[in-house]
Structure formats: structure tokens, C-alpha cells
Image (tube, rainbow, N blue to C red):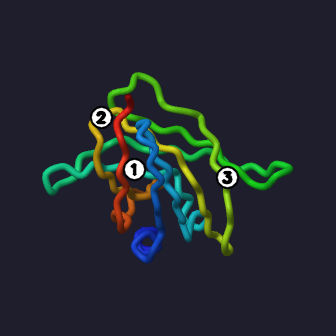
Amino acid sequence: MFAFRLAAVAGALSLSLLLSGCGYGRLHIRIPDFVANGVDGIRLFRLVDGGLQSAGRVVFGKITTTSTGQQMQYTQIVPGLSTPWGPLTAIVKRPASGQVDLELSLINAGAPGYFRFASYNEKGTSPLADGRIYIQAIQ
């Protein structure tokens, strides 16, 4: 568990966001110990009045190899929506052994706002990653 948390704190996730105004954002994420820690997905937290509110999660599927490279299916569990969003597909890049870079599309069923995130596995949830992302509301 310590190695899982240490990996997350040591830069497990880096991000940038491209906004479109359509209620979704693009999250670029790097998980350095994805393989070693068996990461199952990421948990999203909305920033509210100086605190955090749970805002759902992204569940990762298996990584598969295609003729154009590797990809992963994922599904977003969004509070306020009756069904999960997805499955969607992310291109997988492996910058170094055990590391995974992903680009995920995320939606926001609530008011526009800033979000933070943390990876999780069957042992628990890592500390929050540095940074935040802004996602418009679904229109």
C-alpha cells in the first residue's frame, strides 16, 4: 500500500485539460506504476468551498493491442446520471517500463467546476494528484 501511495505522490498523475464548452474535458494522465500497482481507475473530486466532494470515478478496462497500437476501454460513473458513460476508448502510450499515459474524455453532469483526482486499486485510493481540471456542465 505504501508503494502504491508513494507512486501516486511522486508524480503518478500529470494532467492538462482542453476545454470545449460542451460539458466534457480531456484529461491527460500518466500513471508511473500502473502495472506494479494494478490500478483499477481514478476517483474524481469536485472542489467546493475549499473542500472536496466525491464526483464519481473512471473504471479502467483491459489494455489491448491493435494494429495501430495499444488501447484501453474505460467507463465513467457520473453522479446524477442513471447509466455509466461509456465504454469509451483511450489510446495507451508506454513512455517507460510499467508506466502508462492515457488521454480520457470526462463529462460533468453538475455545475461547471474544478475537479481533482486520485488513482485507486483494490487496496485503496492514492493521495490526490497535484493540479486540477475545469469541466463545463453538460448542456
> Residue 38: x, y in percent?
56, 59
Image spot of residue 60 (x, y percent): 56, 47
Question: In terms of secondary structure, where does tag 3 sit?
Answer: strand
Q: Amino acid at mark 1?
A: Arg
Between 28 and 122, the residue placed more toward the observer is 28
In this picture, is 57 found above or below 35?
above
Q: Is residue 67 left or right of residue 130?
A: right
Q: Residue at x 54, y 65 (%)?
A: 30
Please, which residue is most extreme toward the front here? 21
| Res 96 label | none
Nearer the observer, 28 or 98: 28
Q: Distance of mark 2 from mark 1, alpha carbons? A: 16 Å
The quarter holding residue 37 reads bottom right
Kind of residue at badge 2? Gly
Reply above or below: 16 against 83. Answer: below
Q: Which mark is residue 91?
A: 3
Residue at image mark 1: 43
Q: Could you tell whether 99 is left or right of 54 in the image?
A: right
Identity of the residue drawn at 57% across and 63% down: 34
